[in-house]
Amino acid sequence: MVNINFTVNGKPYEISIDENMRLIDVLRDELGLIGTKEGCGEGECGACTIIMDGETVNSCLVMGFQADGSNIVTIEGLEKDGQLHPVQRAYMEAGAVQCGFCIPGMVLSTKALLDKNPSPSDEEIREGISGNLCRCTGYNKMLIATKKAIEYMKGE
Amino acid sequence: MDIKKVYNSKSVEEVIDLLGEYGKKAKVIAGGTDIVIALNKNVIEPEILIDISKIEELKGIREEDEYITIGSTTTFAEVVESQIFENNLYGLHKACKMVGSPQIRNKGTIGGNIANGSPAADSVPPLMALDSIVTLKSIDGIREISLEDYYLNPIKEKELLINIRFKRPKDNQILTFAKLGLRKALAISRLTLSSYIEFEDKTIDSIRVASGALAKFPMREKEVEDYLLGKSLEEKTIEGAIEVLRNSMDERLKGRSTLPYKRVAISTILREILEEALAIEEGVKAW
Ligand code: FES
Ligand code: FES
């Protein structure tokens, strides 16, 4: 076992984990944050996307112990005071959610993009979610949702 | 996975001592984008895992004297964001930008691209075309080797890849890159080419061409270089160069099922790197 200290969704944790755990295993199995999904386990699908120190990463490709000292945001960390994050709201309203499996990762990639670039072009939006595969929607709804989210965030 | 002990290392010295002590029982991990897949599938089964991603000394891009040095744990995203790789060093920017997805670029490192020895490591051909030098360190001392020779004498168990450096190009020396093949999962095979050309007007005064996925490792394409050297870069030169490269591929990849595809595909990307080099030389922005 190895001890790690890290912050997840604003809350500090000090936990002891198995050396063999990947970060996705730590989040899901140790912290119960099952919003983070495992699709491929190989860095292809982005279902396991989280934000680590401000950057999106595939949590299936990070070892748990490497998260020591880091600041992590998962999908559970987006809503504030019972209010959905503008990106979550926009995704719902645009009908960009079908089965939902890709959505936690997709929403986090969109949020990370808008945090860095508040008014991206269509091409930049598509590029921003290019690491997130969706087998249902065909991605156009995500584009529409992201444009809505941009408007909401400007209004905030 | 059967990892018994892990280290979040803070210094190069610590890593080198650990590698000296544990040898092949230990594996170094940085971005994890290749190694965690291998660990998860039990392709490799180290007992010790040493994280180097938090060591300051290994991070970032520095310009010193006539050299540009890239620390081994510099991520693809950091190269893409760096202003150093605009203009005539655009080829490396483009290669790193075309790696995987945003998530992979945020984590994957230049050092990992070299140390893992994949034939399709996208950042390697441009670095090879730049005639880069790799610095490795172990308890036995420092080893420096050109990237071109590196694949014949790659990283050893006890070594840590420290950085890679190359001479800052002059204005008339231009690095370009092109790639064919999409996502890892979808691509039948990937092909990359990079060229470093010194122009005297339209004439190629010196040239290095490097390929990825045309052999077991990224390599210099010397026959194409010899053909192009001293020629004026125009349509018939490009066509000639494509023929020369196809001939060397025919020999190298004889009997491979991917050869017919690669023979066709190569003409597009060889043309792209040469035309892009000329465009940049003539002051047309390619980005
Ligand atoms: S589960 Fe991590 S990228 Fe697919
Ligand atoms: S909504 Fe089903 S995978 Fe995206």
Image: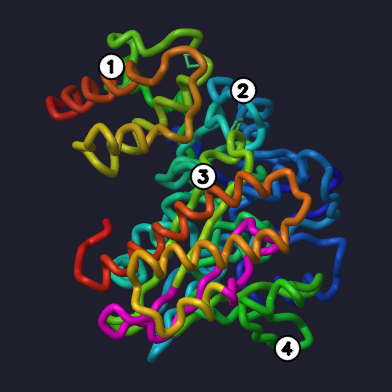
| Mark 4 closeness class: few <14, some 14–19, many ≥20 residues within 10 Å | few
The residue located at (33%, 62%) in the rendering is B276
Q: Which of pointers 4 and 2 indicates the residue nearer the eye?
A: 4
Q: Which of pointers 3 and 4 indicates the residue nearer the eye?
A: 3
Picture layout, residue B9 above or below residue B16: above
Tag 3's secondary structure? loop
Where does the magenta region start and end?
Answer: B196-223
Q: Which amino acid lies under the numbered mark 2 shown in the image of this protein?
A: Gly
* C-alpha distance separating marks 3 and 4: 35 Å
Q: Is mark 1 within 8 Å of ligand 2?
A: no
Q: Is B101 left, or right, of B23 in this rendering?
A: left
Q: Which amino acid lies under the numbered mark 4 shown in the image of this protein?
A: Gly
Give residue A148's position: percent from left, percent from top: 21, 20
* C-alpha distance separating marks 4 and 2: 46 Å
Chain letter of the residue carrying label 3: B
What residue sits right under mark 2 in the picture? A32
What residue sits right under mark 1 in the picture? A90
Q: Which amino acid lies under the numbered mark 1 shown in the image of this protein?
A: Ala
* C-alpha distance separating marks 1 and 3: 27 Å
Chain letter of the residue carrying label 4: B
User: Which mark is first along the chain, 4 or 3?
Assistant: 3
**Which of the 4 image quarters holds residue B147?**
bottom right
Chain letter of the residue carrying label 1: A
* C-alpha distance separating marks 1 and 2: 26 Å
Q: Is B217 left, or right, of A70 in this rendering?
A: right
**Viewer-proximal residue, A135 or A104?**
A135
